[in-house]
Image (cartoon, rainbow, N blue to C red):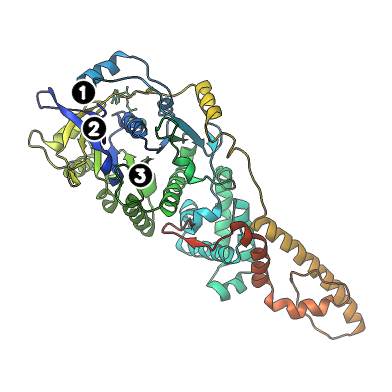
Amino acid sequence: MIEEGKLFLGGSRNPDDSFNKPEYLELKFGNRHGLITGATGTGKTVTLQILAESFSNAGIPVFCSDIKGDLSGIAAAGEEKDFLLKRAEQVQFSDYEFAASPVIFLDLYGEKGHRVRSTVAEMGPLLLARLMNATEAQEGVLNIAFKIADEGGMALLDLKDLQALLNYMGEHAGEISTRYGFVSKASVGSLQRALLVLEQQGAEYFFGEPALDIRDLMRTTQDGRGMITVLAADKLMNNPRLYATFLLWLLSELFEELPEVGDPDKPKLVFFFDEAHLLFDEAPKVLIERVEQVVRLIRSKGVGVYFVTQNPLDVPEAVLAQLGNRVQHALRAYTPREQKAVKTAADTFRTNPAFDTQEAITALGTGEALVSTLEGKGAPSMVERTLIRPPSSRIGPLTDAERRDIINRSPIAGQYDRDIDRESAYEILMERAEKAAKAEAAQREAEEQESESAAGRWSLPGFGDDEPTKKSAGRRTSTRQRETVVEAAMKSAARSVASSLGRAIVRGILGSLKR
Ligand SMILES: Nc1ncnc2c1ncn2[C@@H]1O[C@H](COP(=O)(O)OP(=O)(O)O)[C@@H](O)[C@H]1O
Ligand SMILES: [Mg+2]
């Protein structure tokens, strides 16, 4: 069934239920994105599984997330079961075999896969604002925070770095406002509280180093299969916004880092975005526009993005319009909203005179779907009512022992499993605060002495960077005092970290770092 340049999806059926023809997804249109939809229990995960298996077999690395744990079985060979063999026969899958796919497990919590992290700096202000559910004013403050850090080359690695910088901004709100634009103490305070909430939700696990190197998502095995990176997301789903932001960050990293390839013979990577509604739920318009832009542009980097969600209405029109390969499983149509979803879903297909699309959507069986893929010059094929082929790997979860074994043998074993805590904003600002406190104390002491000797001389409270030497300290700090704070912050930060980043800071469409 492995025809050159095509993935076998299953067999379509005639109105009398007899076999019609095999249905394929053409690899050269694999980067033209896709959509898998359907109600719970209709076969979405298995469809994702057979697609991931097939892309991998064709040498294409895959990224996907495992929301319920039931996708982990993709790393084990399936077992011979009657319903699978029957399905294989129905779709005329003549060379059906059981086999495991090569998998790397990732887990933000490091429990069900290798730890995966990003730094605050790499994520950038736009995505962080989304993660923190920031208001516009708060987002403005975050932007300024990043500006201060970016300009000064102050590394924002983990949440305590951002917390330290916000503290600093709160304390120096006046000066920062004159220099960068209005920073209200109230907004800073709200952001600090939002950060605490994030920490409590376990996001602190995620921020830090070593950050994921996206080249690790692009691996192939020695026998030429694409590695399937599975993000264990069951625990992560307790924080849906972190889940969605993390996936979005990955997508934006891929977009910023991969070279242009135009329209390749086959994709360089296929990215499944499961529970895609979380990406768009209550997302601000500007973010949706940026996502739309990234999805449109990432195609020429050879990345195919496949959204998986219950309802096609979950995906904004502008994004939906770009999803060329569609697998629509059954939808219910009881409520008006459901009926509308069915109609919308039906309207996106090129109709087939043999059946009524809308009616078919509600009548599909489990593991059956309306399928339309791009063909010819890139036009959608006529929709076909298709039985999806059975997977070669196991349907259902791995055992803990099986998973452990795969994690231990993984090509990235050991690479991300330990924390690195290098000098960053937190340490820099802590050190500076200490110095400032010392300087102030020293100055007070000096002032007291001076006022004894030369009564009437005034001085401003200082917070300079330099260790004042005893006697003359008072005068020196007060004359230097005006240029300190922000400037000094930058200088010392620039010294310590510009070198560690080693590059000018440019941010991409979604605000993540550009290399
Ligand atoms: N293509 C298929 N071939 C064989 N069985 C399937 C297929 N698709 C779905 N099934 C059966 O239906 C069940 C539910 O499918 P699943 O993909 O988990 O649904 P969803 O992800 O939409 O909730 C599976 O556990 C499996 O038993
Ligand atoms: Mg599922």
Q: Is residue 6 visible?
A: yes
Q: Nearer the viewer, mark 3 or mark 1?
A: 1
Q: Which mark is residue 91?
A: 1
Ranked by sequence position, the earlier of labels 3 and 1 is: 1
Q: What kind of element bears circle 2?
A: loop
- Ligand 2 found in image quarter: top left
- Look at 12% across and 40% down and name the residue there: 351
- Residue at 40% across, 38% down: 61
Q: Residues within 10 Å of mark 1 (few under 14, many from 20)?
A: many
Residue receiving disc 3: 277
Vertical position of residue 488 compared to residue 107: above or below: below
Quarter residue 36 falls in: top left
Marks 2 and 1 close (CB-CB < 8 Å) = no
Q: What distance separates the C-alpha of mark 3 from that of mark 1? A: 31 Å
Secondary structure category for the residue under label 1: loop
Q: Mark 2 = which residue?
A: 330
Quarter of the image for the N terminus: give it.
top left
Vertical arrangement, residue 210 with respect to residue 41, above or below: below
Q: Which residue does the image show at 7% across and 37% down from the upper left?
A: 353
- Report x, y in % for residue 43: 30, 29
Drawn side of residue 238 relative to residue 419, left or right: left
- Of residues 70 and 437, the one nearer the viewer is 70
User: In the image, what residue occupies the spot 54% across and 56% down?
Assistant: 121
* Disc number placed over residue 251 in the picture, else none: none
Q: Amino acid at mark 1?
A: Val
Q: CA distance from mark 2 to mark 3?
A: 18 Å
Q: Amino acid at mark 3?
A: His
Please name which of the two marks, 2 or 1, marks the residue nearer to the observer: 1
Q: Position of residue 508 (x, y in %)?
A: 44, 59
Q: Under tag 3, what secondary structure?
A: helix
Q: Is residue 3 above or below residue 126?
A: above
Instruction: Please state which of residues 189 and 105 is positioned toward the viewer in this rendering.
Output: 105
